[in-house]
Amino acid sequence: MNKGYKILLTTYLLLSAYAAAAQQPGTEMKTFPSTEEALSQIGRAEAHPAARSADTAAFTSPAQRKGFIRRIIDYYSRSNIDRTFEKKIDWSIAPGPNYSSDVGFGLGFLVAGLYRLDRTDSITAPSNISIYGNFTTEKFVLLRFSGDNIFNHNKQRLSYAGAFVYFPGAFYGVGHADGAEGYAQDLTTTMGLFRISYCTSLVGRFYIGVSGGIDYTAARYKDSGMVEHMNKIKADVDAGNPVPGGRIGELYTLLQQGRYDPEKQDPFSNYIARTGDKPNAFNTNIGLFAQYDTRDVTFNASKGVFIKAEAKWYPEWLGNTRRNFGRFTLTFDFYRKLWKGAILAYDLYADFTAGTPSWHMYAKLGGMERMRGYYEGRYRDKRLIETQVELRQKIYRRHGIAAWIGGGQVWGTDKFRWDNTLYSFGCGYRFEFKNRMNIRLDYGWGVYGNQNLPWDRKRSSAFLFTASEAF
């Protein structure tokens, strides 16, 4: 609780500084003199003794150092001005809070940069790079980077992304039924991944491209021993001893009522034993994709359409762990301005797998971009479909809010059933950190868990912090 209080206090101070920064007068580009204007003002000062004496007094008087909050205000008051024509790369940095019921309170940092490969080209959109890190009270560690290089009048793009994750998380099983039951086994995963893609314009805004990726996941786990615990308690109770208190006694009572099954308490151990899959897995892929993109900005679109279809192949000869499988993904995004400062954004995403992937390569519902509010991977299977609609409203200067509602489901191991559809809803705050690049603070909610299990009775929820919009 003390750690969470400190994080929230730090967050309050920094966001207060952001808000103050956004409301300072004179933050637009036109309020800053050009180099020529500054030089001409120096010349005029030399010509007037009064101005010269005033300057002398200013230089000889002791300088006042600005306070910490004042320096933050000055920094963020100018952070959203487009300086990509005058700088090789325009960097900014920001801290931020986050919370998830699965990983606890966290403090993240974000480093974002905008740049132009050709600073004389005003037609090509600026390229971008972002580096994100997050450390939480439950020892979750995430380091992630991503970027887009856009060149040749928007005709070519080179995109990349990578991440390192240390995650003391859980595994719920494969299929909707396993996710809904809520039996979770502690599973500490160490993951590394890298993605790269290149595309070129074929006709106008229609692109074709190639992609590649590498994934490695190592898992550490141990059995809970709940079957043995329940058998021991039953033997003690049959011998005349009372039912023990605490969580273990509650589970024994639920077992007697037919509401708890200790055989299901270790879903990862059961999955490995049933399938013969390996806890540590290495996967590589090559792919082809086609996309149509009329968005005005890739990381914060206000109008346009984005459609992408991609096929990936994971052959065993490329280094995959004991298997061949394929994957097809489809993305459809639509953006439209409604009224002043309002944008309606729609997203549809599908992920289909052919063959049998490694346990960590199934399509996963949830995360930071789609079905926000769900633990990513609680619901996983060979097929996934998700959709969401979001309203984004600029409130005042660099401040904005957003609200969304969405739905999705996984199937393949289980049959597709409409009543297995899950929903997601939430709201968020936006701060224009860089020119057209927002800091995003979202809080999302999902469905309630299994009411029979003591650890799963709350509604699924998550607090998210990152750069750029979810889609």
Image (spheres, rainbow, N blue to C red):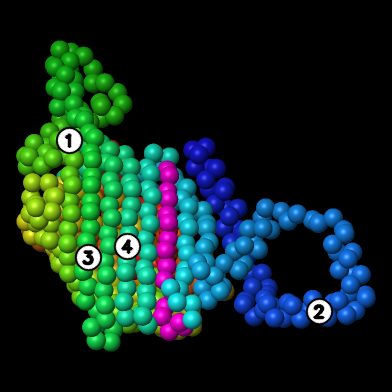
**Residue 38 horizontal side relative to residue 393, left or right:** right
Kind of element beneath mark 1 = loop
Q: CA distance from mark 1 to mark 2?
A: 78 Å
Mark 3 is on which residue type? Answer: Ser
Q: CA distance from mark 4 to mark 3?
A: 10 Å
Q: Earlier in the sequence, mark 4 or mark 1?
A: 4
Residue 211, numbered circle: 3
Q: Earlier in the sequence, mark 4 or mark 3?
A: 4
**Which residue position is annotated with label 1?**
266
Magenta run includes residue 200: no
**Neighbour class for label 1 at 10 Å: few (<14), some, many (≥20)?**
many
> Which residue is painted at 85% across and 77% down in the image?
45
* Mark nearer the viewer, 1 or 2: 2
> Which residue is painted at 31% across and 77% down in the image?
156
Kind of element beneath mark 2 = helix
* Mark nearer the viewer, 4 or 1: 4
